[in-house]
Image: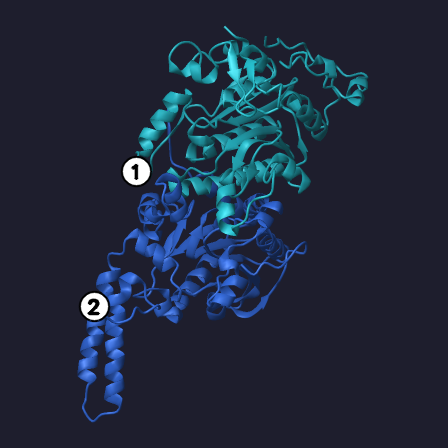
């Protein structure tokens, strides 16, 4: 069993068609970006970032939270919510059938996973979207789960971190899905009023109604390299303005240049960087950088000199149980 | 067959033909000794009957076409018809003045209010100037500036929604269209004055919602509100924009469907044949409803108002709860 499988909740692990979707089979994996053929084990060690071209491969919601949160304690929130089909929607397929297919395919009930846990011992609530579930689209359950996560953060007086990966609102739920934009943003305005930080992490891709609501409302907006982030899709824009889009349009680097995000952070540094900012926002004492043994492997010594030297009288974080 | 009358939609053409006959008859009657008034009356009754018949069973797609009717009243018309002493305010104070959103202060039955709405154009030149009612980020930022001004001076905010959607352009993305919309949702949720939103024509997606987070949502009878335009939905799910009619039906975008789904508080009945056939009549009723709603919201304390608004937004969504 790989380290990844060990981390997964039992319902995702084991036999059946589910496991093959979350864990690449075989010894070799091909990078979808540069085509390099890589050891699967190597890709796991690099958190699914291609060592040849640095392409950040898409992560499942649970994988994402597994990599981000301390191994323990963790508590899944907003469980027991299931999508409905209020419009009896059907195009070439029934929405109902699309939902069951997505559930079977992904092993998830919906396109979001929400957890309360710790980030380098700092209590937080964190959520992530699952692009594999209908393109991470936002319907009523995604909106409700998000809001429950925010309310839990308010209840526990902790920061809230959310990883977006979505094509936008879920058309099959019509105006219900549009209203989730207002709902999630309203919840964040309450979080902000309570003085609690929200960190929005934009991963590939974050578009449409998700970009135009909670994803752009972070106290800091962080993006992974080369993530596509924007309101309108590139094809729609191209058809509207009838010109070719500039190279790198709507990518993280473009967003940084135009002032939309605070920083681009490599996957292996996300824990450190977000922890650093959030602990300052919440006036925590500096922590020992070395206390973090995130599943980063031996690739990079990510602790900046300043952070390493700022150890002082900090009560050092208890050793985490590690994930390998 | 008579030439197509552009003031009438395709499904209204039989009405247009009758109307033409009536006008011809009137013209003839004017210059002759023969009394044709009986005949005119007969045709007018017939036209009325036909209009009632056609409008009694509009499909969702026909409602969508009505919402985009070229003669439909726009925000400026509602301002002219219902608001006194209107003073338009311009610009987002940072980049530009977006003509696709207009706003300013004025009096609603004496009470000063802040009006904000999408604005479409009538003729080609104005359509282009207004960008077909599709705002860029500076439009939403102007709207937010006016809302904050309203909050500062305790003026209720009244918005008119009528847009195909936020503009999908290169510059709009460079200036962060997503954030401009998101910020408005975030701020409107806690704006410390009553906010009344009405969809008067097209409620196109996030570009509509960006001035649509409030205490009350009203819709005109022949207006639509949707998460994506019927054409956009059709081109994604049906792989063809020509299937817009089916997409509109499937997404249930009409005011009546949305009221049934409890996503809209009230649908305001329009005159026979649509708002543009009797704007004055419609606006008299609309104005009354706005005044009533405002009085109801004003009766609440600010804390109560904000808590009610918050709970209203938290309640949006339809899902199952399993253990």
Count of picture labels:
2
Q: Chain of mark 2?
A: B
Colour of chain B, in one word, is blue
Colour of chain A, in one word, is cyan
- For the C terminus of chain A, give its image quadrant: top right
How far apart are labels 1 and 2 at the CA level?
A: 34 Å
Location of residue B208 with respect to A97 vertically, above or below: below
Location of residue B301 with respect to A319 vertically, above or below: below
Where is residue B89 drawn, in percent x and y?
Answer: 61, 63
Where is residue B34 drawn, in percent x and y?
Answer: 18, 91
Name the foreground residue: B272 vs A92. A92
Relative to A81, is B148 on the left or the right?
right
Q: Secondary structure at mark 1?
A: loop
Q: Is residue A59 visible?
A: yes
Pointer 2 residue: B49
Q: Residue at x 53, y 53 (%)?
A: B194
Q: Evaluate whether label 1 is on the same chain as label 2.
A: no
Pointer 1 residue: A88
């Amino acid at each position: 069993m790989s380290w990844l499988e060990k981390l997964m909740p039992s319902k995702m692990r084991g036999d059946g068609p589910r496991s093959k979707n979350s864990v690449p089979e075989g010894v070799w994996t091909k990078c979808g970006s540069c085509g390099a053929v890589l050891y699967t084990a190597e890709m796991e060690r690099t958190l699914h970032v291609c060592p040849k071209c640095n392409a950040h491969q898409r992560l499942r919601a649970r994988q994402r939270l597994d990599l981000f949160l301390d191994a323990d304690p963790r508590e899944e929130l907003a469980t027991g919510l299931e999508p409905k089909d209020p419009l009896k929607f059907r195009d070439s397929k029934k929405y109902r059938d699309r939902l069951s297919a997505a559930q079977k395919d992904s092993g998830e009930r919906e396109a979001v996973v929400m957890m309360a846990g710790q980030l380098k011992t700092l209590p937080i609530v964190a959520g992530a979207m699952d692009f594999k579930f209908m393109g991470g689209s936002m319907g009523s359950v995604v909106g409700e789960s998000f809001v429950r996560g925010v309310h839990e953060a308010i209840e526990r007086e902790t920061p809230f971190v959310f990883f977006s990966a979505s094509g936008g609102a879920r058309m099959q739920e019509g105006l219900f899905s549009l209203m989730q934009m207002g709902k999630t943003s309203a919840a964040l305005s309450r979080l902000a009023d309570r003085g609690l930080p929200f960190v929005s992490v934009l991963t590939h891709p974050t578009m449409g109604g998700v970009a135009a609501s909670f994803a752009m409302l972070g106290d800091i907006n962080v993006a992974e390299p080369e993530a596509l982030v924007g309101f309108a899709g590139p094809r729609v824009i191209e058809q509207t303005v009838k010109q070719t889009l500039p190279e790198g349009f709507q990518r993280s680097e473009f967003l940084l240049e135009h002032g939309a995000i605070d920083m681009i952070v490599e996957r292996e540094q996300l824990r450190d960087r977000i922890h650093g900012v959030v602990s300052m926002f919440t006036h925590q004492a500096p922590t020992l950088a070395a206390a973090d043994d995130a599943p980063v492997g031996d690739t990079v010594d990510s602790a900046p000199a300043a952070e390493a030297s700022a150890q002082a009288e900090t009560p050092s974080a208890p050793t985490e149980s590690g994930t390998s | 067959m008579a030439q197509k009358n552009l003031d009438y939609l395709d499904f209204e053409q039989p009405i247009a033909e009758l109307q033409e006959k009536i006008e011809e008859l009137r013209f003839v009657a004017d210059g002759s000794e023969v009394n044709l008034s009986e005949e005119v009356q007969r045709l007018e009754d017939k036209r009325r009957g036909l209009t009632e018949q056609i409008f009694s069973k509009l499909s969702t797609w026909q409602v969508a076409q009505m919402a985009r009717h070229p003669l439909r009243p726009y925000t400026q018309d509602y301002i002219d018809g219902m608001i006194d002493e209107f003073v338009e305010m311009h610009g987002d104070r940072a980049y530009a003045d977006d003509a696709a959103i207009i706003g300013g202060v004025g009096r609603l039955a004496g009470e000063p209010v802040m009006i904000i709405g999408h604005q479409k154009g009538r003729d080609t030149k104005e359509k282009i100037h207004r960008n077909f009612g599709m705002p860029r980020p500076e439009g939403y930022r102007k709207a937010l500036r006016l809302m904050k001004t309203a909050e500062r001076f305790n003026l209720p905010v009244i918005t008119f929604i009528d847009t195909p959607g936020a503009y999908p352009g290169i510059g709009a993305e460079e200036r962060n269209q997503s954030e401009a919309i998101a910020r408005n949702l975030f701020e409107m949720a806690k704006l410390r004055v009553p906010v009344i939103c009405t969809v008067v024509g097209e409620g196109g997606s996030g570009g509509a919602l960006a001035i649509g987070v409030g205490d009350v949502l009203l819709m005109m009878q022949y207006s639509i509100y949707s998460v994506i335009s019927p054409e956009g939905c059709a081109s994604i799910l049906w792989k063809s924009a020509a299937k817009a009619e089916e997409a509109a039906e499937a997404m249930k975008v009409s005011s009546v469907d949305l009221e049934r789904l409890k996503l809209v508080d009230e649908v305001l009945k329009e005159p026979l044949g649509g708002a543009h056939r009797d704007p004055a009549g419609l606006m008299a009723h609309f104005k009354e409803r706005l005044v009533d709603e405002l009085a109801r919201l004003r009766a609440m304390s600010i804390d109560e108002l904000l808590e009610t608004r918050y709970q209203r937004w938290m309640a949006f969504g339809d899902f199952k709860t399993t253990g």
